[in-house]
Each structure stands twice: as C-alpha cells, then as structure tokens.
Image: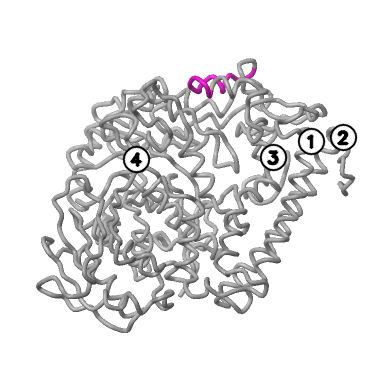
Amino acid sequence: MWTQCWIDYSNLPKNSQAYAGYFSALYVDGFKKDEVISTAYGELKKAAEGLYGCTPEVELEVPESGIAFIRSEDESLGKEGYRIHVKDNVAFIEAATSAAVIYATFRLLALIRTSALTPDTDITEVPDNPIRMLDHWDNMDGSIERGYSGNSFFFEDNDLVINERTTDYARLIASVGINAVAINNVNVKDAATDLVNDRFIAKVSRLTEIFACYGIKMFLSLNYAMPIEYEPASADPLDPAVREWWKHKMDEIYRAVPGLGGFLVKADSEGRPGPFTYGRNQADGANMLAEAIKPHGGIIIWRCFVYNCQQDWRDLKTDRARAGYDYFSSLDGEFADNVILQIKNGPMDFQPREPVSPLFGGLRKTNQILEVQIAQEYTGHQIDLCYLIPWFKQILAFETYMNNDPESDTTVAGIIGGRARKGSTGGMVAVTNTGNDENWTGNDLAAANLYGFGRLAWDTSLAAEDIAREWTSLTYAGDAEKQTADGERAGDLILRLLMGSWPTYEKYTAPLGIGWMVKVHDHYGPSVEGYEYDRWGTYIRADWEGLGVERGPEGTGFALQYNGPNKEMFSDIEKTPDELILFFHKTKYTHVLHSGKTVIQHIYDTHFEGYDEVLKMQKDWQKLKGLIDERSFANVSERFERQAANAREWCDIVNSYFHRRCGIDDEKGRTIY
C-alpha cells in the first residue's frame, strides 16, 4: 500500500459504486497512440482493476458510459491544461497534448476517489507555473545529501539504477502535476560528472524516456568545471576554447539523449568553482552554457545560492543575506532567454522562518524560479511533523512592489508564473524529500509536503488546508471516514495535526526569525551557538542585552535591498513584523513586540507552548489506534516519540540559554534550568 502513497487503488472511496460505470470503456479521439496516451490508459486500467476488478474496453466511438480522451483545439488550454466535464455518464478529458492527458487522468481519478466528481462537473485547469520541478540531492554512491528517507533509488555503488521503482516514482510525481526532475546532487563530483559521458549516457537516455512517458522532462545537475579535466584545461566562460568545448559536448549529449530538459548548475558556491574563479560574472557562466544548449531546445537553470562561505565572525558588516542580491541584481537583463535563475525562498538557507528573498522584485528582466525545500533539513528531518504548504502560501503571496503597474501581478507567484512580465518564464522547484524507504518519505505524514508542493505548483491559489484535506482523503481513503472515541473523523484529526504543525515547530525552535540555532552539520536538534563563531555567516549575535542581526540602514543595510513599502517596513524596528524582528534587528530582550509581550517572554512562552503542543499532537495521534492501517499508525507514533524528545531539548536548552544570558525571569515562574 505505502509504496503507492496517495494513488493506491486498493481502498474503495466513499460512494464508490456510483463511479463504477466510468471504468467500463475508454474512447480516444484525435491523439496518436503514443507512449504517454498508453500510460494514461494504463493508469485507468490500474484504477479499474484495483477499485472495481474490471478492465476498461477501448471503444471506437463515444461509449454510453466511460471516459473519453478528446484532442482539443482550445488555445487557452496551452500545452498542459485540460478540461474535465461529465455528460450523459461519460467523463470527457479535453486537452491539446498527450502530456496534458496524463495530468488530467490523475486529476479525474482523484476527483472520483474523493467523491468530488458529479454529473455537473465541468472544470478547466491550466497550470500557474510553466516549470514544476523536483531537485534530488542524490549522490552516485547511493547516499542523499540532506536525505531523511533512506538511500537513493536512482544511484547505488556509483551506478545508475533503473527498475520498477523508477516507474513508480515517475507515476507518483506526475499524479500531482510535476513536469521536471533533476536526479543528481547539485554538488557534482566524482562519478556524477560521467552522467554526461559514454559511461552512463545510455542509461540516462533510458531514464529520460521513462519520465517522458509521464509527461516529465528529466534534467541533470552539471559540473560547471568539467572542461578543466579536458583539453581546454580551463572553465573560463569567455575563453573561446572553453565555449567551443561546451558546444561539442552539448551536441554529443543531445545526440544520445534528445529528450533531456537541460541542466541545473551550482557554481561559485560552497567550494564549487565557477565564473568568479576567472574574474567573470554569473551571467558570463550561465550564458556560455545557454548558448551551447540552445540549438537543442534545452534550458539552463542557474542557482543563485552564491555567497562568501569564508566569513569572519568578527566582521559585523559583511552579511550573507545580502549576497544573492549583491551578485545578481546588477546583472538583471543580461541573462539569455533560455536561462532561469533559481532563487531560494529566503536570503539565507531554508530556515523555519525567513523573509522572502529581495531578488524577487529586484530582478525585473530575468526569468526566475522559486526554490523551496520539502526535505526538512531545518524543519525536523521528516521526524518532526512540519507541513510546509502554509508557509509556501505566504511566500507566494508576498507583494514585491516590482513596478507601478496595477495590472501586473508582482507577487512572488506572479513573477515566477510569468504574469509580472510578458515573455518571461519560470516556476517552482522543491528540494525533494524522497528516498528508497518503503513509504518514500520516511514519515508517512511527510508525504503531505510532496503532494502539497505538486498541487500548489500547479495551482498557487489552492488553500493549504484544502490540499491537506485532499491528501488525507486520498491517502487514508475509507479510514479517513472512521470516528475516534470522542466522535472526531480520523481525517479531520490528521488534517488538524498537519495544519498546526509548522506554527508548533517554529514555536519550539526558532523564535522571531532568528534561525541557525541547530547542531552543526547535522542540523537536527538545538545548539544555540553551534554556528556562532564559524565561517558560514550564520549568527544570532546574542549578548546580555539582546539578540539578532542588525540589517537595517544602520547595520548591514540588507533591508534596503527591498522595494518601496517593504524597504520602509523592514528598516524600522517598530514596523517590522514580530515573526521577523530578530532577522532584521538587534533587539533588546525587554523590547515590547506588537503582541504586547517582551522579546524574552515571547521566547519563554513559545518554547513551553511548542513543547506542550507536541505532547498533545502525540496524544491525539494515539486516538487513531485501530482506525487506520497498523503500519502507518506505528510509523507516525515512533516519529512523534522522537519529536517529543526533540521538542523538550529545544524548549529547555533555548530557554536556559537566554535566561542565563539576560537574567530576566519567566514571569510565569516555570522551570528553567
């Protein structure tokens, strides 16, 4: 069951027999019988057999009852949009391409399994984002950097693995509208460099074909410094010999793998060589590769995670948060059309709370893609429950004030979706949370983040609660309808746990946007000063009087990188939202927040509250014993045990640390060590 996650067809949905007729026949009109259409039919067949024990017959005309794929000429649907409507006991899927049919097929099945398909159903869905992508940080030895769900299912013993699980994964992510995937770690080294060489290129081609059957473009992370090992002995992007080397290399790659989507590149970051090595800028490096790949229709996704990782902690002016804007804003408009800049949601590194990166709104002429992380590197390692979609919704809704045109959508969602600037392209990418654990995501409930990311990337207007409710209904099927001893639906209880989990996690870990108080390297569990005197630029600057990094005009000036009202808001401690005050300002413990509490009392209260809330979550989960699948109940129960221990450590260590720093007692007299 759990290898199928939310597309398991062994459990009948509520009112299931009402939908049996749709699985009696399939009619296809206007589509060639390509691999994608065959895949869509295969999914219908799998659902029919699993839910009803039947096989749809392929008909030569529209059946009296069944499903019909109809090729549409409606240009408003684009290449991936579709219309699903019901007429006379037939569910019609209208789309312009076979890729859109596969997405629509999964959507139709979800509507059926959640009892949402009615005789009046008539919906049109066109994705908000052109690119909806997952980035794997998988290494070829089988390990996964920041992976918390077992080892890689792509790589083992420095070899590329293709098996049944590969297809299962393509199916899983296509079911939520993912259309791109990068399979290897952005830190490309050793055997991974050979993914574009003869050693592995045939397997890369085969894997690309498997993903293509599900409407998914495969990407590879590329070693920017690769030509250093060959005749040019250089990676200077302005060296004609290096440029020529890349042109020949791209020709060679695309002859073997014509369906490859392109490449993801990390350069000049955390020890990776790049254009800076040769005194060049980021546009020089990206455009060199874009020029080489352009004849093949590929794109270069260039990560903006570039900063000085050799910072001196004594330096109070150098600010890692500034780096992305400082390096890239002056290059706005200089990147080729087939380059997309991949920008992390915040200026630092996936902390539980960060402001939105000022590059969103700072770049007005450049393609952009939003990078988020569902792997929970800093949000609980898929041990602690932390449903991240409510946070992603806030990021997408952030108004950047990019221009003064009231007709354009200059929220982050509008920028990455191409609605802020005509002719632009972009999308959303998540550093994914999957591995070779039976359930893909380690913690069963962590699958809600994978599902939620896909649905949100497709439709940024969806509510986080609706996405969670849909995931719960599909994953737990009939079990979600059962009631606990106190009369609550099992599905409603799970939904409640998911929706409260991110605020709870934030309470017992990172107060008021400070971040980074984690164990070094591992990043799970508290170490308040773990990164305080190191080279990474990750400081909290706590002393006896207060804490936080001053990033206003009188400090590092980071707040000045924002536009208009945001610049004014973040520059003024009195206007900065409470949840970000310690990110932007060195703040006294006695400073009174908008909530009416002092900073120190907020720290005490939230950490005690967070720990108490975890204990309640753990207790509530126990109410599902005997109501849901035993394996799933045991899996999450074990995770809650570890989360409770983690939350207590955070609560006691953080409160004790700051009490000892400032000497101010908790006004409620609770035990602080």
Q: Look at discs 4 and 3 and give the one toward the viewer.
A: 3
- Looking at numbered disc 3 in the image, what kind of residue is underneath it? Pro
- 566 lies left or right of 234: right
**Label 2 near label 1: C-beta < 8 Å?**
yes
The residue indicated by pointer 2 is 664
Position of 361 relative to 186 (above/below):
above
- At a point 25% along the width and 31% down the height, the residue shown is 423
Q: Residues within 10 Å of mark 3 (few under 14, many from 20)?
A: many
- The span shown in magenta is 555-566
Which circle's residue, 1 or 2, is located before the other in the chain? 1
Residue 234 visible in rendering = no
Q: Which residue is mark 1?
A: 600
x and y, in percent, of residue 605 in the image:
78, 44
Q: How far across and how far down the image is residue 421, in percent?
A: 31, 29
Q: Amino acid at mark 1?
A: Ile
Side of 657 relative to 448 (left or right) = right
The answer to whether the residues at label 4 and label 3 have Cβ atoms under 8 Å apart is: no
Mark 1: few/some/many CA within 10 Å (<14, 14-19, 20+)? many
Mark 4 surroundings: few (<14), some (14-19) or many (≥20) residues within 10 A = some
The type of residue carrying mark 2 is: Ile
